[in-house]
Amino acid sequence: MHRRDFIKLTAAVGVASALPGWSRLAFAADPPALPIPELLTTDATSRIAINVQAGKTTFGSHVATTWGYNGNLLGPALQLRQGKAVTVDIHNQLSEETTLHWHGLEVPGDVDGGPQGIIKPGETRTVTFTPTQRAATCWFHPHQHGKTGRQVAMGLAGLVLIEDNELHNLLLPKQWGIDDVPVIVQDKKFTADGQIDYQLDVMSAAVGWFGDTLLTNGVIYPQHSAPKGWLRLRLLNGCNARMLNFATSDNRPLYVIASDGGLLPEPVKVTALPVLPGERFEVLVDISDSKAFDLVTLPVRQMGMEGAPFDNAYPVMRIQPLAIPASGTLPDTLTRMPALPSLDGLTQRTLQLSMDPMLDMMGHRGSMDHGGNGFDFHNANKINGVAFEMDKPMFSAAKGQYERWLISGKGDMMLHPFHIHGTQFRILSENGNAPAAHRSGWKDIVHVEGDVSEVLVKFDHDAPKEFAYMAHCHLLEHEDTGMMLGFTV
Ligand code: C2O
Ligand code: CU
Ligand code: CU
């Protein structure tokens, strides 16, 4: 580790341990039930309505203003069918602009909901699309430039479940909210009077915004009772910046069956599952022994977030098996993964991620001065030397052609979960290494941290200049301060 990184790390951890919140939010002895997002399918006219709205949510003993889709916090799970058109009416009832981005969906640029798809307060944006990709657990969230981190922190996030025949024919657990359970994990931080305490400042622009409390589907340490047998968890790391590392309190293994963009060829058994901000993994857990246990997140190495309470296994939720038997199984094989095409002659692009040296310096001084002495951090994170420019796409990709993208984080030791719109890609190498088995399938986020990652992308839809696709760091404070580019197809 470079010396400056060590200084930054020390400064950031100092801030985290000074936070007051942890002592106030103790775990309930009798945990509340895990809230299950409503499964929303299209109506008879193939429409879905989404209201972006403000509301109130109780956390511990405080009531906070929160934002949600069709509710006070988070949002529904939209169940879409491959090949079936859907029209979504998005009503913005907030008093500020927002956009709604379909993270992981291969949809045209004008539907994608990136920073150009602005919905003014009181207005409605209607998009129509037909999912063509394979079954996957994706999600939707705001993408308002410079405000994404705050709008997500306020509570805006929902799931999109794409279904297809292949998935239907597998005998996986599939009873929503019973043995097929969404697990949206986010960290939060609260002010003394219980409001969500978000700030985009020099410190968070450098290392990201971190909370001191984990919420699972919007609740602190909930409990889920499930039939004994195979339990399917759809994990989403919905944190702005925090990497999670899922495991169980009694070391029972997790069987990974799907990554961001769909099923893996076969289950991959792990005892710990690191998940970057924005990533999804589906896992099966065997709970046939009828013993209760916790899903936890283990400590990880990430700048700014290694202090208490995350320096020990932190409970995400309690899982309580019921006496009734479950019906799903863990198949030996799941899908066929096409062989990687030849890399000869492919268009190659290098995306160099970087941080303004001034931000780097201010970042580690930030423990004393979040104000940054007037330094403008808003464009301090860059790709190929430039901060995001809304009306200047950086390049144009050819539709339907494979391209090889090299994403380099050489220059700092920061975590950059790098995300690309409009595609589910394959990872050729990840931060200098061959990708792990469960990271070798369909992905839309790749791990970049001090080294180079290579991905094979292909875009099957158009993205014109006015609605360019985005490629960016999914550490939302890096994204909001410039580590993003637009490109056309
Ligand atoms: Cu999940 Cu461009 O974002
Ligand atoms: Cu996205
Ligand atoms: Cu980053």
Image (spheres, rainbow, N blue to C red):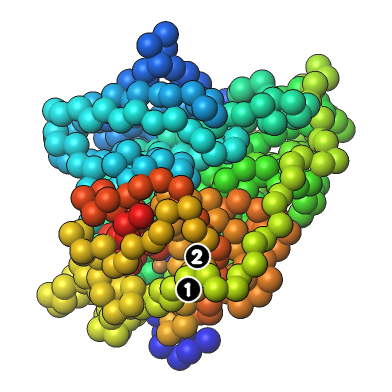
Residue in the image at 61% along x and 70% along y: 343
Q: Secondary structure at mark 2?
A: strand
Residue 162 location in percent, x, y?
54, 32
How many marks do you count on the picture?
2
Instruction: Answer left or right for 283 relative to 469.
Output: right
Which residue sits at x=34%, y=28%? Answer: 128
Horizontally, residue 193 falls left or right of residue 75, namely left
The residue drawn where x is 67% and y is 60% is 340
**Which of the marked residues, 1 or 2, is nearer the chain's N terminus?**
1
Residue at which label 1 appears: 348
The relative height of residue 409 versus residue 338 in the rendered view (above or below) is below
Q: Amino acid at mark 2?
A: Glu
**Spot occupied by residue 142 in the image (x, y as percentages of width and height):** 31, 43
Task: Kindly report the distance in space between the C-alpha atoms of the residues bearing marks 1 and 2.
Answer: 6 Å
Q: Is residue 273 visible?
A: no
Q: Which residue is nearer to you in this view: 88 or 240? A: 88
Three-letter code for the amino acid on which mark 1 is drawn: Gln
Q: Which residue is mark 2?
A: 403
CB-based contact (under 8 Å), mark 1 and mark 2: yes
Q: Quadrant of ligand 3?
A: bottom left
Element type at mark 1: strand
Quarter of the image for residue 66 reads top left
Q: Residue at x 80, y 21 (%)?
A: 327
Vertical placement of residue 465 versus 261, above or below: below
